[in-house]
Image (tube, rainbow, N blue to C red):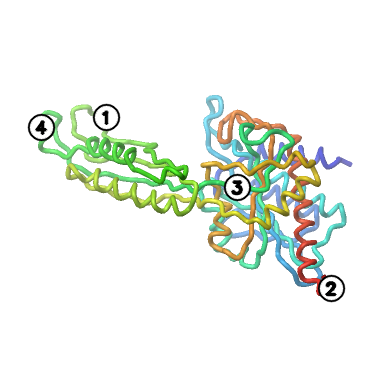
Amino acid sequence: MKNNHTLLLDTYNHLHDLAEVSWKEKTTRDFLCHELNKLGLSYQTFQDHYGIVVTWNGDSDGPTIALRTDMDALWQNVEGVWKANHSCGHDSHMSMVLNTLRCLKESDFHPNNGCLKIIFQPAEETGKGAQAIIKDGIVDDVDYMLGIHVRPSFELGMGQASSAIYHGATTLLKGKIKGIQAHGSRPNLGINVVDALGAIISAVNSVKVDPTLPASAKVTQVKAGGENINIIPDEAEFSIDLRAQTNRAMKALTESVMRAVQYAGEANGAEVQLEIRAQMVAAEKSPFMEEIVGDAVRQMLGETSLVRPPVTPGGEDFHFYTKERPHIQATMVGLGTDLEPGLHHPNMKFDLAAMGNGVAILAASVIKLFEKAAERTDPSI
């Protein structure tokens, strides 16, 4: 019989090889369902996406505690080959959550006073996966939620963990510009969309934000013109990436950038269309959940292993759960793994032994949450 460490590595290797992009995680789902069947747990699948929700009911009423993991991979050029690639660690997140379930089952844990839900969420990289789960009503009864994410070495080292990750807010904008074609020798007869693009880039770079809060705005994609050099181009597309550390700062930044783009892009007579393609909200702190996870880290890894939560401009759709359902208290565990050279790098690597630490922290946190809930409802306390 395989030990838990071997099972954890086998699960990771299998999921790593199965890598599938957002909204196409069918084979990943099928493998996870196969493993859940072995554990004898009931689960729900969906018609419109490949998420899975396990519901482990206790014997009496109590809080609903959820563990959430993302499922999707990125589409990347890996050593000259374009393919789905788990360079954000979602394969490890699924492995840790699935093996947390195994550990809880093997330790004779039972959610006597409540319910444990396990959410395998699709399409995190699109910023819309969490919203699909929310739309299905899965988290309406959830009181507490835990997530986990492997962290790069410049944030956390191997053997370290944090009780939260303070992700920033992200907004991705997509724009189109319409001008008028003309011969290159008579530019006065046309409206050059490249001129509009130049003005837009300058305007975005000139937007001023609150200097006390980390934020950035930058044009990340431009496309204009066809094959002929001697034609004034009449169509262009562009993309803008916005980052801000708080949701309030993101709201102000988005409004300022959209206004600046419209004014600058239309200054030479061009027409500009601009829309929000994707958004991720910033993390909101939960002192209660951070205390629970902090205690679990100290218990399982030792006092010195608990470090301050990293503050990162990266986005994470996990935080939509608390934004859309404010009654949920949630936090995301930051797991030190000696990850190099960084998340989303096509050749990202990390110390696989760290996944055992993640399982220990998640299992201990779940147990502590149920214990704390029992204390709150015990009339003798």
Distance (Cα) linking label 2 and label 3: 48 Å
- Residue 166, given in percent of the width and then of the height, sits at 58, 47
Viewed as shown, does residue 220 lie left or right of 324?
left
* Label 3 CA crowd tier, 10 Å (few <14, some 14–19, many 20+): many
- Residue 92, given in percent of the width and then of the height, sits at 68, 41
In the rendered structure, find residue 227 and report the number of the disc placed on it: 1
Distance (Cα) linking label 1 and label 2: 79 Å
Query: Viewer-nearest of labels 3 and 4?
Result: 4
Residue found at x 60% / y 47%:
25
In the rendered structure, find residue 186 and report the number of the disc placed on it: 4
Residue type at mark 3? Glu
* Label 4 CA crowd tier, 10 Å (few <14, some 14–19, many 20+): few
Query: Viewer-nearest of labels 2 and 3?
Result: 2
Mark 3 secondary-structure assignment: loop
Viewed as shown, does residue 105 lie left or right of 168?
right
Residues marked 3 and 1 touching at CB (< 8 Å): no
Query: Viewer-nearest of labels 1 and 4?
Result: 4
- Residue 244, given in percent of the width and then of the height, sits at 46, 46
What residue does disc 2 label? 380
